[in-house]
Image: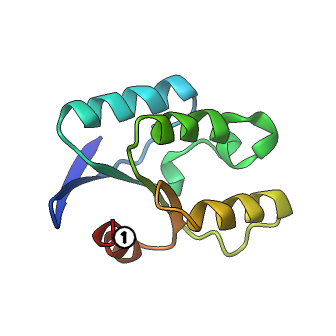
Amino acid sequence: MKIETYPINNLKIAEIITDEIVLSTPEEGLDLLGNLYYQGFDGIMIHKENITSDFFDLKTKIAGEILQKFVQYQMPLIIIGDFSQVSSKSLQDFIYESNTGRQVNFLSSRSEAIQAFSRI
């Protein structure tokens, strides 16, 4: 796993670069958050492909448990991916509601993520 660093305003933002799944359990979410917080990061970008598909099935409750950790520790998280083809109404609503705030966002590109972090 590689961590790309982006200095945005006075923030240090991490982008996770890997071909592997790095978020599949709430414990892995907490480990990632803790490790990056310890390294002085103020926000995290992760790609949809690096998150277990169970995360996007809201019935599993994995998304809620993982995202609760990021909200609780006030670590902004942006998940980058194509969410335009989401067929689940509940997931569409979840993404829409998340994107109305600043703590967790689902965006389509790195450039959109960087713009979002620049507004924090």
Number of labels in the image equals: 1
Q: Nearer the viewer, residue 98 or 18?
A: 98
Residue 21 against residue 7 in the figure, above or below:
above
Q: Position of residue 52 (x, y in %)?
A: 60, 41
Q: Residue at x 64, y 69 (%)?
A: 83
Residue 118 against residue 34 in the figure, above or below:
below
Within 10 angstroms of label 1, few (less than 14), some, or many (20 or more) residues?
A: some
Q: Residue at x 52, y 53 (%)?
A: 49
Quarter-wise, where is residue 7 in the image?
A: bottom left
Q: Nearer the viewer, residue 78 or 75?
A: 75
**Is residue 88 at least partly visible in the picture?**
no
**Is residue 81 at least partly visible in the picture?**
yes
Check the image and tell me how it is coloured: rainbow
Q: Nearer the viewer, residue 86 or 11?
A: 11
Mark 1 lies on a secondary structure that is helix
Residue 88 against residue 32 in the figure, above or below:
below
Residue 108 against residue 75 in the figure, above or below:
below
Q: Is residue 74 left or right of residue 41?
A: right
Q: Is residue 113 left or right of residue 39?
A: right
Q: Amino acid at mark 1?
A: Arg
Q: Position of residue 5 (x, y in %)?
A: 18, 55
Q: Is residue 50 left or right of residue 10?
A: right
Q: Position of residue 11 (x, y in %)?
A: 20, 57
Which residue is label 1 attached to?
A: 110
The quarter of the picture where the C terminus appears is: bottom left
